[in-house]
Image (tube, helix red, strand yellow):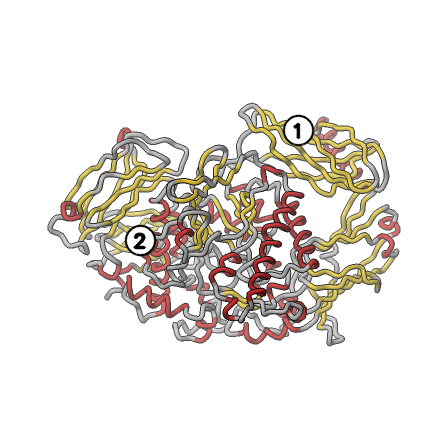
Amino acid sequence: MLKNLYSCILILLFVSVFAQSSERNLSSEKWQFKNEKENKWLTAKVPGTVHLDLMDHKIIPDPYKDENEKKVQWIENEDWEYQTLFKISSKELQNKNIDLVFNGLDTFSEIYLNGKLLKKTDNMFRKWEIPVKLNLKVGDNILQVKFKSAVNVGKELAQKVPFTMPESPRSFVRKAQYQFGWDWGPRLVTAGIWKDVKLEFWNNAKLENVKIEQKKLTKRNEDLNIYTEIIADQNGKYVLSINGKLNNIQLKKGKNTIQVPFTIQNPKLWQPNGWGDPNLYDITISLQKDSQIIDHKTEKIGLRTIELIQEKDEQGKSFYFKVNGKPLYIKGTNWIPGDSFTPRMTQEKYQKLIKDCKEANMNMIRVWGGGIYEDDELYKACDENGILVWQDFMFAGSFYPSDEGFLNTVKEEVKDQVNRLQNHPSIALWCGNNEIDEAIVNWGYQKQFNYSKDDSLQVWKDYKKLFHEVIPNALKENVTPEKNIYWPSSPSIGWGHKESLTEGDSHYWGVWWGEFPFEIYNEKVGRFMSEYGFQGMPSLEAVQSMFSEKPDLNIENPIIKAHEKNARGFQIIDQYMKRDYIVPADFVKYNYISQLLQARGMQIAIEAHRRAKPYNMGSLYWQLNDCWPVISWSSIDYLGNWKALHYQVKRSFENQVILTEEKEGNLNFYAINDGIEKFEDVFVDIQVVQYNGEIVNEISTVPDGKFLDGIIKFDPVKIENLIQDFNKNEVFLQLVLKGKNDKIIAENHYFFVKPKDLKLSKPTITIRKISPTEIEISTDVLAKDVYLIGNMHFSDNFFDLLPKTSKKIVLSKSLDKIEVMSLWDTMK
């Protein structure tokens, strides 16, 4: 009986809501598109892009395959039109208010309804909301969106500036900057209706926006202020319900901002990954009039505190995040758009990539400023998995104008995006841009383009106006105070300057761009490393996907070369590979070694950062993902396969690790604890092991004291006393960090020489099938960097298998035969 009554109430609520406010998805209507120069209309998909529509009609080849990217460059110079015919009923037209809402238009467009121009747009990142009741009619209505070439409009805008701007015309266009080409991505400058379009029907009033402010957090309760923006078409008395608690309110015609206090009893904290559960709460707000629900919204929030701490100290100035009152060592990566055609990104792909971050022991991603403000699904996934978000605004690596029109559209862009995102507990920081301060100071554009002194002063003045006035002021107006943590530019100081390592955040590119050896990472450690990286090949499956026909896997193949967007990419990879490995001629082995090389470089960097805790309090490598099949800095390729780097990151980012530093003939050992569990009486068991498994020496070392700031440095051990009469290339160290009652806290091993100098023997690797999706792998002697080959995900891969040991591996799907390779196979 109660169940039936509850169902009836839900039905009545549903009817009431949709009698007062409802929406209709126009994306699902039959859309058409055409080149503005042509007369023939073709079917189109919304959301979508013109490239995808042209591919669907086989007018262009897939630009991700072969060298097809070159064949589609003409598209960016054309104007394109989209239209749909939809019906409106007399009942729909009876609604007092009808709004046409475009959540994303790419980029310069004119919107027509039944032949009347409603709006001109100029910003891919804005939401466009247009009252259209007076423009609609019963029966057929035609909606048209005409897109101008963003490249051509950008060139026109660039001509209005008296000096040449770098990266022109992209910096004049409020559009995803990476679409103009990057050193990991193709040039595919899109146009189209890239997000949903809908009609919103409403009467009396509607909830426009909800902001939730955390006032005071204690163990007993969390005091919130809930701010709602309500648009009313007449004065009147209403009821605002928050999780069933009723509040009588008075609305005036037009825009109203209502503040209501709300308390959550016995709150459970939202914790970052590695510290506990990311607990979430639903806050449901409904607007009622005359006992009818006329509109409602549900926000999912997490209760936590975040502070960015910058305090002067003897070495410079700290830079770290304090979460829920405690310093958090940040471990993570940089996120770029997951596709060059963003409408192809699915909820499943967002969820998988963020779960891959969680599984690799990360607690933060940086959404990089040359891409897009990502779909709600990304932030939802971060909320659910305890992954904090460093959110750049979408400006990267160029100079930007500051005319009134540009600043106004940026102000509205910031408003739209922060109102959409600020209630997500994952948002930790708003950052003005990527590498623009550095570009102005370090990159020599002024000399390259022959700037006058006045030109240079104008560039800096424009920069200050945009990133030190317009954006922070827009944040102040739209974001609740506890969520308004703003950092103008990442990095704060360029990597060639000494101060870049003593304060602020650092992008260190001495490795790769500077071509310094990986070992320089041990010296170049800043307070917070927000970018550093090295390229590696993607999986063999991703390489094969570059071809439309049977692939010729050869490093000299022009198709493979076309999917390396850095002009000197292969040359730099080869240079580093020769330093550390024997360079294979065989492509499969070359692919394997390039992944090991990338993983080795990032392991050295991450371990150097973590050993420097608490001087260093963050490590975000470049980059997590790819937007197409490519040789790049990513740890996960375009197909979603983990490269060797991602497996290594998972190991290097463990909450508890034991790390080794070799210095001046000594070994220093560091025990690091980033978790909330406490460990006492810790010590390290050190075994010196030959590659055949024979233990030739064994000692224990005990630290002086307990964990301080989550790190212990042990007394140094002389290498010659440890390895005795053996050569460095004949033995390795097996390390076990233990606590009370011999509890194992962490394990690791250490090799004294570079991989190419290891005196390896041929391992006999045996694979035993436990079940269709689980295997056990074992070896008689050391098998270095074991590579399980198969088009699937392995629970571990590219790992060292120690002599006379075995390891169980879980497979994502069953496989009849698994090929295996180790480093020895590349040294024959």
Q: Residue at x 84, y 49 (%)?
A: 92
The image's mark for residue 767 is 2
The image's mark for residue 164 is none
Q: Which of marks 2 and 1 is nearer the N terminus?
A: 1
Mark 2 or 1, closer to the camera: 1
Badge 2 vs badge 1, beta-carbon distance below 8 Å:
no
| Spot occupied by residue 232 in the image (x, y as percentages of width and height) | 81, 40
Q: Name the foreground residue: 598 vs 440.
A: 440
Residue type at mark 1 is Phe
Q: Residues within 10 Å of mark 2 (few under 14, many from 20)?
A: some
From this view, report whether residue 539 is shown above or below residue 289.
below
| Spot occupied by residue 648 in the image (x, y as percentages of width and height) | 37, 51
Q: What element carries label 1?
A: strand
Q: In which quarter of the image is residue 815?
A: bottom left
Q: Is residue 12 left or right of residue 55?
A: right
Q: In which quarter of the image is residue 29?
A: bottom right
The answer to whether residue 404 is seen in the rendering is yes
Residue type at mark 2 is Ile
The answer to whether residue 772 is seen in the rendering is no
Q: Name the foreground residue: 73 vs 360.
A: 73
From this view, report whether residue 468 is shown above or below residue 567.
above
Q: How crowded is mark 1: few (under 14 residues within 10 Å), some or many (20 or more)?
A: some
Q: What element carries label 2?
A: strand
Image quarter in which the N terminus is found: top right
Query: Which residue position is annotated with label 1?
Result: 262
Q: Which residue is drawn at 27% across and 63% down?
A: 825
| Spot occupied by residue 718 in the image (x, y as percentages of width and height) | 17, 45
From this view, report whether residue 83 is shown above or below residue 347.
below
| Spot occupied by residue 176 in the image (x, y as percentages of width and height) | 60, 60
